Image (cartoon, helix red, strand yellow):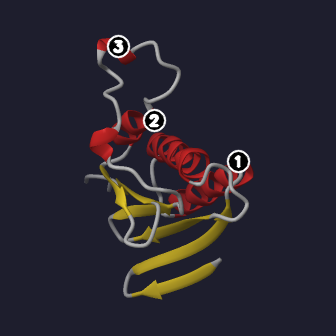
Amino acid sequence: MSDHTSGESKSVEFLLDSTLESVDLAEAEVLRIAGDAGMAEEDQHRLSMAVRESMVNAVAHGNRYSPDKKVQLKIRRHPDRLAVEIADEGEGFELKSVPDPLADENLLRASGRGILLIQAFVDEFRIGRRETAGTQAVLVKYLKRESR
């Protein structure tokens, strides 16, 4: 783990094994930081679900549980938002190649809804190939301020 502070932003980085235990660790760390940032409990739950799904995608689909491949997790806390970056070392993929989970022929499939769920649970979502190898997902959840 490494810890960085710049201006009003703070970030932590982890290099995780391609295991389901790493999924749990990533989710717990994001929840801790979201709670410390004052994120509403419902928003913490949504972000937690999105991080869990992204981590499972990285571990299972990207790195295929390979002990030789790692998942990079970066959590950046800004005054108005949390940004979570999850990157694997797999083959990479293009978002447009993922079948539409809402299409009639895909409704009964056991998998394929993860990205749809992630998009529903966060305020911003980007995913794409990394320059080196693998896929990087960026999830952003805004910190809502109480109105006076």
Where's residue 14, x and y in %?
Answer: 61, 71
Marks 2 and 1 in Cβ contact (< 8 Å): no
Question: What is the number of the mark on residue 105?
Answer: 3
Q: Which residue is mark 2?
A: 114
Where's residue 21, x and y in %?
Answer: 74, 51
Instruction: Mark 2 or mark 3: name the one nearer the start of the chain.
Output: 3
Where's residue 9, x and y in %?
Answer: 40, 79
Please state which amino acid type lies under the numbered disc 2: Gly
- The mark lying in front, picked from 2 and 3, is 3
Q: CA distance from mark 2 to mark 3?
A: 17 Å
Q: Nearer the viewer, residue 88 or 24?
A: 88
* Image mark count: 3
Please state which amino acid type lies under the numbered disc 3: Glu
User: For the view shown, which residue lies furthest in the front direction?
Assistant: 91
Q: CA distance from mark 3 to mark 1?
A: 30 Å
Please state if 97 lies on the left or on the right of 19 as rendered: left
Q: Which residue is mark 1?
A: 20
User: For the view shown, which residue lies furthest in the bottom direction?
Assistant: 6
Dot 3: what SS?
helix
Dot 2: what SS?
helix
Is 84 placed above or below 76 here?
above
